[in-house]
Amino acid sequence: MGRPRQYDLADLLAHARDLWIGRGVDGLTIRALSAASGASNGAVYHAFGSRDGLLARVWAEEAGRFLTFQRDRVTEARREGDATEALVAAALAPAAYATDDEDGARLLLAVTADDLLTSELDEEGRTQLLGLQKELGALLVELASALWERHDRAAVTSVRHCVVTLPGALLLNADRITDPLARHALEHAVRGIAAASPPDRR
């Protein structure tokens, strides 16, 4: 009897990403990945633990690449301009990312880490998502501190609106994630928020 075929995790993730992009998040299932990759259902379960683990791993892989890209954009903006330019760079990072990989940017904006932190998620997936949240949180605090010399909840939440909420609302709902009108609206909304320190929450 021959040895069972071993499936490369990177190959499974690539197939899973293609399914998510092609069919949407609901189209990415253990069975669909098994059919697309040729791996058995058991092999897919072994690799990811559950469908929730599969979704979390695919999104986390993309999010990790994006956060590196976003951080580089912010660092470049901080060198060349003021804190507002860094905030704008962080907010527009999904549109810039989409210039090279529109599908990847749409995947990122389709859900959040909070959406994926379900009770069915295994410890590995939970740790990966929480690590990404921590990395993003550090960036939000850095931007709030640079803008207003504050890192209280109101200041960080205002930055989160600029970097997470508004890009999701404006870019994902545009005809194209790189739509210049959506990008224009996002940039000027962010500049408006940056122009005044947020009120204290008492």
Image (cartoon, rainbow, N blue to C red):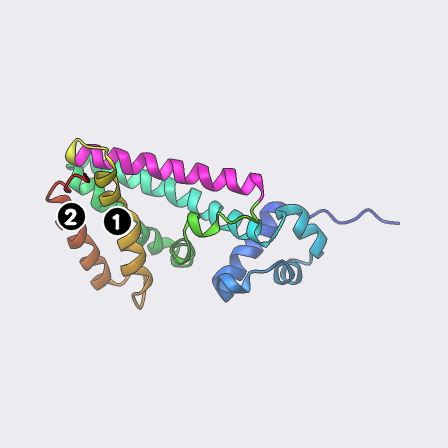
**What residue is at 64 percent from the left and 46 percent from the top?**
47
Q: Quadrant of the C terminus?
A: top left
Q: Is residue 31 part of the magenta span, yes or no? A: no
Tell me, yes or no, whether the two marked residues, 1 and 2, touch with CB atoms within 8 Å.
yes
In the rendered image of this protein, does residue 14 appear above or below residue 77? below
Most extreme residue toward the left is 196
Coordinates of residue 67 in the picture (x, y in percent): 37, 42
Q: Which mark is residue 193?
A: 2
Residues 81 and 51: in front is 51
In the rendered image of this protein, does residue 25 appear above or below residue 55? below
**What residue is at 26 percent from the left and 33 percent from the top?**
142
Q: Main secondary structure of the magenta part?
A: helix
**Label 1: how many residues lie within 10 Å, few (<14), some (14-19) or many (20+)?**
some
**Label 2: how many residues lie within 10 Å, few (<14), some (14-19) or many (20+)?**
some
Distance from the alpha carbon under mark 1 to that under mark 2: 9 Å
What's the magenta region? 122-147
Q: How many marks?
A: 2
Q: Which mark is residue 161?
A: 1
The quarter of the picture where residue 82 lies is: top left
What secondary structure is found at the residue carrying circle 2?
helix
Q: Amino acid at mark 2?
A: Ile
Q: Earlier in the sequence, mark 1 or mark 2?
A: 1
**What residue is at 26 percent from the left and 54 percent from the top?**
166
Coordinates of residue 34 in the picture (x, y in percent): 66, 59
The quarter of the picture where residue 199 lies is: top left
In the rendered image of this protein, does residue 32 appear above or below residue 78? below
Q: Amino acid at mark 1?
A: His
What secondary structure is found at the residue carrying circle 1?
helix
Coordinates of residue 201 in the picture (x, y in percent): 19, 40
Residues 175 and 118: in front is 118
Most extreme residue toward the front is 202
Q: Is residue 175 left or right of residue 188?
A: right
